[in-house]
């Protein structure tokens, strides 16, 4: 056997020195796990829940328009729960609140919304028709530092705005 050749039974030769030990592998895995944990700690779970609420809102409205057209009857989208087949409930995460905090300004060019009821709710439910129309509505959802503004026109046109606390302005959500 020449120099540098690996013999499978003795484990000698240059090839035996090319691998990594189990200790090195465990150490590298542990370090990468700690770095990942540190990165996760920097994430704010409230913003993740606000993202989820925003996505659920958009998807529920899309589903309501499809169901209303397919069934030929109105479909209602609202916060909470329900067992009616013509009602799509939207459930919010425990850190998400209904309404706009006073510390966040209204989007540019928007008048102060009219509030229905004593709890500060404006149009807590939206009715979608088979003709792709809807009850016009304005909803604010927030996590205390960021907010989502959903504007739905009577013709079913949806506009989403998101208050970003870092730049301190409303941005359009595509």
Image (spheres, helix red, strand yellow):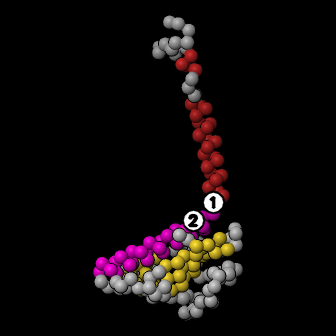
SS type, badge 1: loop
Q: Which mark is residue 43?
A: 1
Q: Residue at x 29, y 80 (%)?
A: 71
Tell me: 131 left or right of 18: left
SS type, badge 2: helix
Q: Is residue 67 magenta?
A: yes
> Is 25 located above or below residue 98 in the figure?
above
Tell me: 82 left or right of 95: left
Q: Residue at x 60, y 68 (%)?
A: 46
Task: Residue 132: name its quadrant.
Answer: bottom left
Task: Residue 130: name its quadrant.
Answer: bottom left
> Is 48 located above or below residue 15 in the figure?
below
> Is 133 located above or below residue 28 in the figure?
below
For the residue pair 16 and 65, the one nearer the viewer reads as 65
Please indicate, yes or no, whether residue 129 appears anywhere in the rendered image.
Answer: yes
How many numbered marks are there?
Answer: 2
Q: Position of residue 151 (x, y in %)?
A: 53, 82
Q: Position of residue 77 (x, y in %)?
A: 43, 81
Marks 2,1: beta carbons within 8 A: yes
Q: Which residues are magenta?
A: 43-71
Tell me: 160 left or right of 44: left
For the residue pair 105 and 34, the one nearer the viewer reads as 105
Q: Residue at x 49, y 79 (%)?
A: 158
Q: Position of residue 74 (x, y in %)?
A: 35, 85
Q: Which mark is residue 48?
A: 2
Tell which circle, 2 or 1, labels the residue nearer the N-terminal end.
1
User: Is most of the magenta stretch helix, strand or loop?
Assistant: helix
Badge 2, how many Cα within 10 Å: few under 14, some, many 20+?
some
């Amino acid at each position: 056997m020449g120099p540098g050749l690996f013999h499978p039974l003795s484990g000698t030769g240059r090839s035996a020195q090319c691998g990594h030990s189990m200790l090195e592998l465990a150490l590298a895995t542990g370090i990468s796990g700690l770095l990942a944990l540190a990165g996760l700690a920097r994430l704010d779970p409230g913003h993740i829940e606000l993202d989820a609420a925003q996505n659920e809102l958009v998807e529920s409205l899309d589903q309501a328009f499809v169901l209303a057209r397919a069934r030929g009857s109105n479909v209602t989208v609202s916060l909470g729960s329900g067992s009616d087949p013509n009602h799509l409930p939207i459930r919010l995460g425990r850190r998400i609140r209904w309404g706009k905090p006073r510390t966040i300004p209204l989007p540019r060019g928007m008048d102060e919304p009219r509030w229905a009821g004593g709890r500060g709710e404006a149009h807590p439910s939206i009715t979608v028709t088979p003709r792709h129309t809807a009850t016009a509505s304005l909803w604010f959802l927030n996590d205390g530092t960021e907010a989502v503004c959903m504007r739905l026109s009577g013709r079913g046109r949806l506009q989403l705005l998101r208050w970003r606390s870092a730049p301190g302005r409303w941005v359009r959500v595509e």
